[in-house]
Amino acid sequence: MVNKESSDEKNDVENNLDFEKDKFVILAQNLTRDYEIGEFIVRAVDNVNLKIKNGEFIVIKGPSGAGKTTLLNLLGGLDTPNSGVVYSNGVKISAMEEESLATFRLINSGFIFQNYNLISTLTAEENVMFPLSLAGVELKKQRERALELLEKMNLSDRREHLPFQLSAGEQQRVAIARALANDPTVILADEPTANLDRKTSEFIRDCFKELKKEGKTIVIATHDDFLIQLADRLITFEDGKIVDEINTF
Ligand code: ADP
Ligand code: MG
């Protein structure tokens, strides 16, 4: 039995979202994600509301285990919530089947992971070409785009290298090139400078500075002070919740 009042309330909320969803690149409402391991339930993301405008540079900081990675995955459509909704580019991705979600991610969400996640059997160039090939780009264009991006990342001379033949920093730069391949609407980066030496960190920070200049919408989980300085909005996340939010522009 659905209580009429709460059902009306739900409709109101949905009508409001319907009205708002096109004003934001990402709109998340009452987002909750539980992990169930045996008899334990961990609430990694707990009833989060977040609205991200086109061109915003958002930094999420917070202690390890706060739920930052889980939140990024939900916002980018790598994971689906137990409850709540996520609209990305006006599309309700939280209720999508995996197959459509994969297609959506390919064009809309560029992920940069903490541990790079390159495909170990593909060269640097092939790793960047991979999302382009999935998006149906013709081979010649895939190659051109991959070379252009690898050049930007100062990696032209590493294009034939397999991931294990690359340093950590080089792998992360390939991963950034891959994330940008399909020119996604949103770039989601999970502690992208966490495991890197100073020089590479600086290079990667400059990449984000450049992407910000280009007006990309960016969401980064990080503790890197330089990246924090670039933020239009700094969100502190703890125990699955937004506990503080500072607008810096
Ligand atoms: P953060 O990125 O802020 O360190 P995470 O999103 O990785 O936090 O994790 C949030 C919480 O969810 C942690 O308590 C973690 O143990 C738990 N968690 C994350 N991923 C999984 C998973 N795949 N299965 C079970 N528990 C998980
Ligand atoms: Mg994390």
Image (cartoon, rainbow, N blue to C red):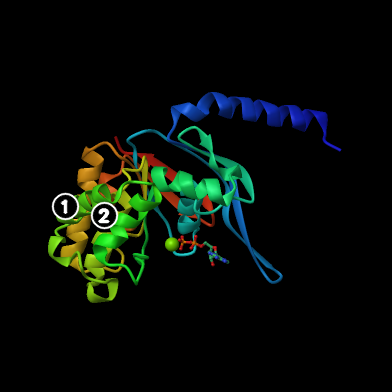
**Within 10 angstroms of label 1, few (less than 14), some, or many (20 or more) residues?**
few
Residue, disc 1: 152
Residue 72 spot, x, y in % from top left: 45, 52
Q: Which amino acid lies under the numbered mark 1 shown in the image of this protein?
A: Lys
Could one spot residue 29 in this view of the protein?
Answer: no
Q: In the picture shown, does residue 139 fall above or below 7?
A: below
Task: In the rendered view, tell whether residue 120 sits above or below residue 74.
Answer: below
Q: What whole-number distance in Å separates the C-alpha atoms at marks 2 and 1?
A: 8 Å
Whole-percent x, y for residue 177 in the image: 26, 54
Residues 55 and 228: in front is: 55
**Horizontal arrangement in the rendering, residue 54 relative to residue 206 (left or right):** right
Query: Which amino acid, by three-letter code, is at mark 2?
Result: Ala
Q: Quadrant of the C terminus?
A: top left
Residue 208: % across, % down: 24, 49
Rendered image: mark on residue 19? none
Q: Is residue 110 shown left or right of residue 50? A: left
Tag 2 secondary structure: helix
- Look at mark 2 in the image and give the residue it sits on: 177
Q: Which residue is farthest front?
A: 139
Please state, as top left, top right, bottom left or bottom right, where the N terminus lies in the image. top right
- List x then y, in percent, for residue 41: 66, 64
How many numbered tags mark residues here?
A: 2
Q: Are marks 2 and 1 in contact (CB under 8 Å)?
A: yes
